[in-house]
Image (tube, coloured by chain):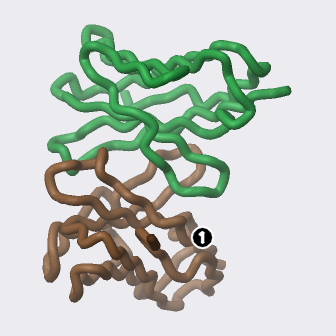
Chain colours: A brown, B green
Amino acid sequence: NAGVTQTPKFRVLKTGQSMTLLCAQDMNHEYMYWYRQDPGMGLRLIHYSVGEGTTAKGEVPDGYNVSRLKKQNFLLGLESAAPSQTSVYFCASSPPGQGVRGYTFGSGTRLTVV
Amino acid sequence: RKEVEQDPGPFNVPEGATVAFNCTYSNSASQSFFWYRQDCRKEPKLLMSVYSSGNEDGRFTAQLNRASQYISLLIRDSKLSDSATYLCVVPKTSYDKVIFGPGTSLSVIP
């Protein structure tokens, strides 16, 4: 069982470049989330989605855009990367009503912006 | 005061020791709490829920102190495999909106 798959696993970007991180889940979960994790800080919610075609802002949405065109995929876009976006990005999915108890995380994407 | 605070550690303990971590939170209305475990360079995974009456799972015990607004995690008979970072998770406004603490690092030494 694949669960939640994130691609790519590693990436180095130059300031100003753009990229898209892909999160794919095969558990038919309604809810999907994008978090970033920085040293000394907890995971912070960037954007989330409660269903196909819907997205919402989390705690730190600036500089990111998302799309959920298909239920199984949640894309995170960086239009113009900045060094402050150097981080580890985790995607998670969950069934509705279970909250964080039902989270399945992907293995993460390590992004460095130089 | 930060919404969720944890002692970052690291806690270095010998095998077989008992160790406890605390996590303080500021939102007194929070209802459901959780402990997650994160191995080095891996994704977080749910360790256990924290109930008002406490929760025990083998060597792990989680407690909630509403009056002082903290949750605790006690690990007995520490194993090398317990070495990880332990994240507390506190609900913010609803089930689906939570705050992850920064984590406490544990190293169990042979």
Quadrant position of residue B63: top left
Above or below — where is A111 with respect to A16?
A: above
Identify the chain of the residue marked 1, using the numbered disc in the image.
A
Residue at horizontal 45%, vertical 81%?
Answer: A21
How many residues crowd around disc 1 within 10 Å: few (fewer than 14), some, or many (20 or more)? some
Residue A4 in which image quadrant = bottom left
Query: Label 1's element?
Result: strand
List the single residue furthest toward the top.
B67
Q: How many marks?
A: 1
Quadrant of the frame with the C terminus of chain B: top right
Amino acid type assigned to the residue bearing label 1 in the image: Arg
Q: Position of residue A3 (x, y in %)?
A: 41, 69
Q: Nearer the viewer, residue A99 or B25?
A: A99
Instruction: Give the residue pinned by disc 1.
Output: A110
Visible in this render: residue B102?
no
* On screen, residue B90 above or below A71: above
Q: Is residue A96 above or below residue B51?
A: below
Q: Position of residue A107 (x, y in %)?
A: 53, 65
Q: Residue furthest right?
A: B110
Residue A105, how many percent across, how many down?
43, 60
Q: Closest to the observer: A66 or B108?
A: B108
Q: In the rendered image, which quarter contains the N terminus of chain B?
A: top left
Q: Is residue B91 depicted above or below B39 in this figure?
A: above
Residue at 65% x, 82% y: name it: A12
**From this viewpoint, is residue A28 visible?**
yes
Left or right: residue B46 compared with residue A66: right
Q: Residue at x 57, y 20 (%)?
A: B75
Please state if A58 lies on the left or on the right of B10 as rendered. Answer: left
Q: Residue at x 33, y 43 (%)?
A: B99
Q: Quadrant of residue A70?
A: bottom left
Residue B19: percent from left, percent from top: 62, 16
